[in-house]
Amino acid sequence: MHPTPAQPSSAQPRPAQTHRAARDREIESLAEFDEVVAAHGTLAQYRIQAVDLTGRTDVLLATDTTGSVFLGCPMSPEAAARAGASGALVFPPVPDLPFDPYRAFVYTPGELFDSLDAGYEATPDARSYAWFQQTRADGDIFGSMLRSIHDDAVSDALDELLVGARVVGVMGGHAMARGTAEYAGAARLGRELARAGFTVATGGGPGAMEAANLGAYAAPFDDGMLDEALELLAKAPSFRPSVTDWARAAFEVRERWPDGGPSVGIPTWFYGHEPPNAFAAHIAKYFANATREDGLLARSNAGVVFLPGAAGTVQEIFDNATPNYYESRGEPTPMVLVNEAHWSEKLPAWQLLTSLAGARAMASRIALVDRIEQASQALKRLSV
């Protein structure tokens, strides 16, 4: 039940799929730094992001750094002075923050939940939310700048991670409790999508979001693993009243079945009462909810499944419908709404969605199904 200790960002491996020509001048790990210096003998025009260079003073003093940019890289005072004098821009690390605004990679569950043994309040996730509340309340312009830098760095890291991926978004409310048939259904949906070769992306929080990420995590295992995991999680049905107990149950599952399948969670500290779930291997957490919402939907290039939810999920339906309506991101992508009674009676979003679609191209890319078991097939049908 203990999260894996977080590695420094400079120690995390660069995903193989992120090597793109447009990013060839980004250095995001110490290994990359050493490779570039050995291969080219210069750092001129490179962008070095959140790499601890305190052990590379001699290299920095001897290497051309003209036009380079150092973003939050710890280094000796003499190395920083030399780089600045040669025309480099040096943005030093910001002390006493619970997060790194210049980070080069998305988060891992172990990183956000580090120190969970001492209670959720001690984790970097909880401390970052507390910092967010404080700086937002006092209107600190430095705090708002750091939040913007952080969110831009996270977006950059997420784009690198998802190069070439077929991403299906799964949207739904945080209130869906573990131990319910609805939660189990969402988990099976996530598993089916992952096994079909899709990258599952969710809002990264509890409820339906966690269930879909859990399903993707369970994809490499036999079917019985998910049934057992659901039983273990049911002992802590909700993150209320204790986020600590809720998170520990998730890490117990991860310890019993390590090396599960990958998926993406995109949560926000704006909703600080909702902790991130521990089943998304890659967590792109934002301070700005609007950036997070738009980014999640924009990256769901293979379609979106909307499970029953409340105001947040309704907002996501029409945030996704708008670019499909105007075709501002190209051809419309599939949209599958699950639960006829919910979306046509309780919250009648389906009627408005079909009215909007009219005779437009998006009309052939939307579907309403009654059961979650029908969602995957509907998604495939709409993708043809």
Image (cartoon, rainbow, N blue to C red):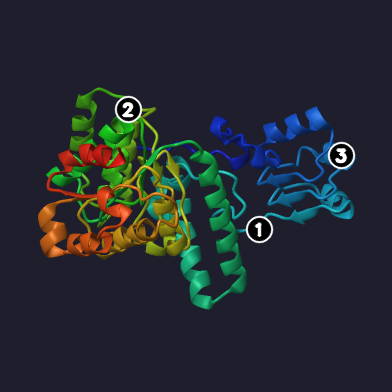
Q: Which residue is mark 2?
A: 257
As measured in the structure, the alpha-carbon distance from the residue carrying label 1 to the one carrying label 2 is 37 Å
Image spot of residue 224 (x, y percent) = 19, 25
Image spot of residue 2 (x, y percent) = 39, 38
Q: Secondary structure at mark 2?
A: loop
**Residue neighbourhood size for the residue with mark 3, other residues' Cα within 10 Å, grouped as few (<14), some (14–19), many (≥20):** some
The answer to which quarter of the image holds residue 323 is bottom left
Count of number-bearing discs: 3
Q: Secondary structure at mark 1?
A: loop
Indicate which label's residue lies in the foreground, 2 or 3.
3
Residue sticking out furthest to the top:
222
Say whether disc 1 or disc 2 marks the residue closer to the N-terminus. 1
Q: Secondary structure at mark 3?
A: loop
| Residue 366 tag number | none
Q: Residue at x 43, y 58 (%)?
A: 294
345 lies left or right of 15: left
As measured in the structure, the alpha-carbon distance from the residue carrying label 2 to the one carrying label 3 is 46 Å
| Residue 63 tag number | 3
Image spot of residue 171 (x, y percent) = 29, 51
Judging depth in this view, the residue of 83 and 119 nearest the camera is 83
